[in-house]
Image (cartoon, rainbow, N blue to C red):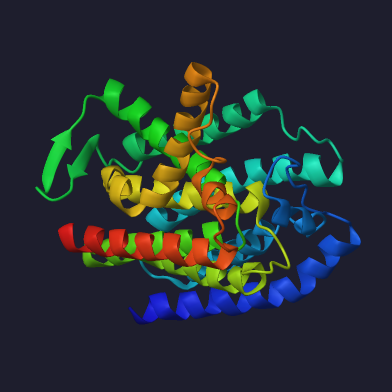
Amino acid sequence: MTRQIICLISAFILTAILGKIIIPILKKLKVGQSERLDGPRAHLKKQGTPTMGGIMMIISIIVITTIYCIFSKENVMPILAVALASLGFGIVGFIDDFKKVVLKNTEGLNPKLKMLGLLIISVIYTMFLINYAKLGTDIIIPIIDYDLNLPIWIYVPFTILVMLASTNAVNLTDGVDGLAGSVSAIMITAISIIAFRAGNFGISIFGAIVVGSLIGFLIYNFYKAKVMMGDTGSLLLGGVISSMTIYLKLPLILLIIAIIPVIETLSVILQVIYFRKTGKRLFKMSPLHHHFELSGWRENKVVAVFSGITLIASTIAILIV
């Protein structure tokens, strides 16, 4: 556990320092947030807030992970596999953000190309686990602790679906200052604890690095945010959460730990279906955090309540695995 704590503190300090350097650069480049005109009115004042802050986390993760792998005497394959997959998702998000806020292309990366990029990374990671890591195609069913061996033709699309769904779910959760970062920090902490208890120290080390970088980022992202993570950060975090749980053979645990991203995603799906059938809105606005904002909740309250729910769900997950 000492190594995990050292990695967490190191990533935290580095990210906090990077914030002092990168945020002024983003301001100078006028890399500003664009807010939806049909969104909560309170969000219009965020127009122009520097985005692409996920770069801070990416740099911190690369630096601390590299240093750890250089000096570690243990097998670093697990940490490298998860790190490269996560960073791959973050790079796709970075390209999308870059096109939007630097090249001033309001559409960003073409949705089909964006999904293709995420799909390619998911396929590569899945095939790596099967062919090189030799982890097999079984997954653990929580609570009953049963190893379910899936045929490869089911395991591959299932794993890819988990990764694509996770990245998009975290992306949808990123809509209130500090929300995606806080919820993700709790989820990744829980996954890291599960990995540590299972003896998979590489995965727990990587989780500690990500949590440390997240806490460092949140210094600048809590209300009122000085920087937004952008797709660079949200896709990175979705990649971290999914790749870690898949490596641990516990993707089903996300139904518990990731309860907030799951609900956020369902709220968008239900809103679309309900509107198409009735012409009316089921929620005042989706994703769900906007519904509560329009119902009078302040951003800090949304973050506190959603984080509290995630903490309870994550605690339950740790206890049942």
Front-lying residue, 203 or 52:
52
Considering the image in quadrants, where does the N terminus appear?
A: bottom left
User: Is residue 110 at all visible to an observer of this figure?
Assistant: yes
Q: In this view, does 222 lie above or below 317?
A: below
In the picture as drawn, the residue positioned furthest to the top comes out as 277
Which quadrant would residue 13 be assigned to in this image? bottom right
Q: Residue 231: image x %, image y %?
A: 64, 47
**Residue 289 spot, x, y in % from top left:** 52, 51
- Indicate the quadrant where residue 95 lies: top right
Evaluate whether residue 50 shows in this view. Answer: no
Left or right: 307 as drawn, with respect to 135: right
Taking the image as shown, residue 197 lies to the left or right of residue 96, namely: left
State the residue in front, 129 or 99.
Answer: 99
Question: Total marks drawn?
Answer: 0
Quadrant (top left/top right/bottom left/bottom right) for the C terminus: bottom left
- Is 187 left, or right, of 256 in this rendering? right
Q: In this view, does 73 lie above or below 132?
A: below
The residue located at (86%, 41%) in the rendering is 103
Residue 68 coordinates in the image, percent (x, y): 49, 70
Residue 228 location in percent, x, y?
Answer: 69, 58
Position of 4 relative to 320 (above/below): below
Q: Say which residue appears at 50% left-offset and 42% top-offset.
A: 167
Vertical position of residue 295 compared to residue 66: above or below:
above
- What residue sits 78% from the left and 58% below the top? 45
Q: Is residue 233 left or right of residue 259?
A: right
Q: Which residue is drawn at 41% across and 51% down?
A: 260
